[in-house]
Image (cartoon, rainbow, N blue to C red):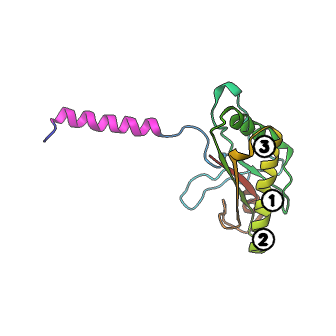
């Protein structure tokens, strides 16, 4: 069966409209923090970044409870060899807690990461401690433990390549994977 030329054009236009409608206009999976340590990954995609004072830019990941969307900022960063949650990321965590509380069927995987310094075993344990710290924060905010899964990748999945403080800072993180 052969489509007439105008039907074929209409089918192509509808397909393109569908694909365009499905594309995301929000933040990236890793939070789209922009600023000092931002760069591009191997595919040329912006990796975002952090600066020494905390979150770069003015996006804190906050949202209103009525909007019901997953917060845009999905990555929080840590200091070297630490699993302490930095105060500038508390609004991000609170926004995720509100989302999870208002969507009891939603679940999240907290992915702990480290920079490359340290042994593989130590980095896996540190990544897990970081993800567990985020999990504890969410639990204190009232999120059900059944909605949260913790996994550590240690140094195995770097956000940035390189052996400098900017790359290390981007790799010391926990990512919210919905």
Question: Is residue 152 in sight in this rendering?
Answer: yes
The residue identified by callout 3 is 138
Q: Quadrant of residue 144?
A: top right
Residue 143 - label: none
The residue identified by callout 2 is 117
- Disc nearest the viewer among 3 and 2: 3
Given the current orientation, which residue lies at the most extreme top position?
66
Q: CA distance from mark 1 to mark 3?
A: 14 Å
Closer to the camera in the image, 161 or 91: 91
Given the current orientation, which residue lies at the most extreme front position?
146
Given the current orientation, which residue lies at the most extreme left position?
1
The residue identified by callout 1 is 129
Is 62 part of what is drawn in magenta? no
**Magenta residues: mostly which secondary structure?**
helix
Around disc 2, counting alpha carbons within 10 Å, would you say few (fewer than 14), some (14 to 19), or many (20 or more)? few
Residue 137: x %, y % from top left: 82, 45
Q: CA distance from mark 3 to mark 2?
A: 28 Å
- Residue drawn at 55 percent across, 37 percent down: 25
Around disc 1, counting alpha carbons within 10 Å, would you say few (fewer than 14), some (14 to 19), or many (20 or more)? many
- Residue drawn at 77 percent across, 49 percent down: 135
Closer to the camera in the image, 134 or 23: 134
Residue 127: x %, y % from top left: 76, 61
The answer to which of marks 2 and 1 sits earlier in the sequence is 2
Please tell me whether mark 3 sits on a helix, a strand or a loop. Answer: helix
The answer to which of marks 3 and 2 sits earlier in the sequence is 2
Pointers 1 and 3 in contact (CB under 8 A)?
no
Pointers 3 and 2 in contact (CB under 8 A)?
no
| Residue range highlighted in magenta | 4-22
Q: CA distance from mark 2 to mark 1?
A: 16 Å
């Amino acid at each position: 069966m052969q489509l007439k030329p105008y039907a074929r054009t209409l089918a192509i236009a509808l397909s393109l409209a569908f694909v365009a409608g499905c594309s995301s206009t929000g933040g990236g999976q890793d939070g789209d923090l922009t600023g000092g340590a931002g760069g591009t990954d191997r595919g040329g995609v912006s990796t975002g970044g952090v600066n020494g004072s905390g979150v770069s830019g003015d996006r804190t990941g906050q949202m209103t409870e009525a909007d019901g969307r997953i917060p845009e900022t999905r990555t929080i960063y840590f200091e070297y060899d630490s699993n302490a949650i930095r105060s500038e990321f508390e609004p991000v965590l609170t926004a995720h807690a509100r989302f999870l509380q208002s969507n009891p069927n939603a679940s999240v995987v907290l992915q702990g990461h480290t920079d490359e310094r340290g042994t593989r075993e130590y980095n896996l344990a540190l990544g897990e401690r970081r993800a567990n710290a985020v999990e504890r924060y969410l639990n204190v905010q009232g999120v059900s433990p059944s909605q949260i899964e913790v996994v550590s990748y240690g140094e195995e999945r770097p956000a940035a390549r390189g052996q400098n403080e900017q790359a290390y800072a981007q790799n010391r993180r926990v990512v919210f994977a919905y």
